[in-house]
Image (cartoon, rainbow, N blue to C red):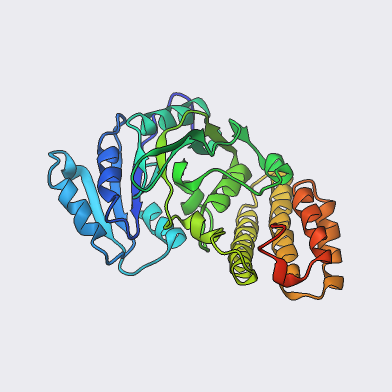
Amino acid sequence: MANADHTPTVTLLVIAWRMRATIGDALRSALAQTYPCEVIVSDDSSGDGTLDAAREVLSGYPNAANVQLRSTTRNLGLCAHLNELAHLARGEILVCLSGDDVAYPQRVQRLAEAFMRHPQAQLIGSAVDDIDAKGNAIARRVRGLPECVDQRWFLRRGKLVTVLGASMAFRRKLLTSLPPLQGTVEDNMLSLRAALLGECRCLQEPLLAYRLHGGNLNAWMFDRSGHDYAAYERRHRRVIAMYRDIAADQRRCVAARDDLPRERKDLGLQLAAMYELEAEMRESILDRPRSQWLSPLWRGLRHPGLRRKSAERTLKLLLPRRWFGRSIKA
């Protein structure tokens, strides 16, 4: 059991895929941290020179001998990449740093101190400062959540948002003592795992610069660059698959932990059902006759966390499908 007198060991994971142009900034920020930590720089078989660019940066640092530079043997995707790294890392706390972001020097220190103050915390994120592809400031102190969120908060929240993956630090056991992550996007799965086992927290201080560009995973997942039905359908198919992955992950985690209090397990299953219902509503609008939209929409209207989206979708009953993506967007 963690306690407030225990100084946690930390592994800083610099995770990259096709980030040759930005890996230098990320890596220099990792080496500038004020808290002693293991650093693992891992490229997910980019094939674009990212690994060579990282090696070049490390060659100029006298303390780089303590940095592990590696690549996966084949492209794994983010979730499987994290599973692999969790078994390589020695730290009990894993701090994630994307190879296109920049950590402020005090980031690991602040996160480690927060884990010491809150022994029940399983995952701690933070607000961030948004920057553009060239590193110019866009917005400060954004993308944060309340200081402490629990399962009930996630059930009530209307946008299915969780801690931003780019800002996360979490106990390694969220990966090593629970079933492996399966899917494309890690944010929601890890946040719900943390709430299932203990506390999920978010520092209000921005601890990194979060780079926005066309290659962001979230930008791809929720791509709104197209304004026709085809683009609308592509986006929704991706999101449907993601929400079903999240629900399945939460169900696997609940089943794996018989030692948890019944209330936590019940709330975990309710969260899984909420994500499944959200996926069903989206799929109904894409594939089913309108008469078959009514049941999932009605269940959504009765769910506190899905009411707003469900109300918006009921208006689509009056519109031809070809208008979706150009008019009301769910």
Q: Quadrant of the C terminus?
A: bottom right
The residue depicted at 79 percent of the width and 63 percent of the height is 316
**In the foreground, 64 or 207:** 207
- Give the x, y percent position of residue 207: 42, 33
Q: Is residue 30 above or below residue 18?
A: above
Task: Tally the marks.
Answer: 0
Q: Is residue 180 visible to us here?
A: no
Along the line of sight, the residue nearer the viewer: 274 or 8: 274
Which residue is found at the position 18% from the left and 47% from the top?
A: 57
Residue 149 in sight here: yes
Judge whether 103 appears above or below 5 on screen: below
Q: Nearer the viewer, residue 235 or 240?
A: 235
Q: Could you tell whether 214 is left or right of 246 in the image? A: left
Please provide percent x and percent y for residue 211.
40, 46
Q: Residue 239: where, in percent of width, then height?
A: 61, 62
Residue shown at 80%/50% (left/top)?
Answer: 303
- Front one among 105 and 64: 105
Q: Is residue 94 shown above or below 291?
A: above
The residue lying at 36 percent from left, 36 percent from top is 9
- Where residue 244 appears, x then y in whole percent? 64, 63
Residue 232, quarter of picture: bottom right
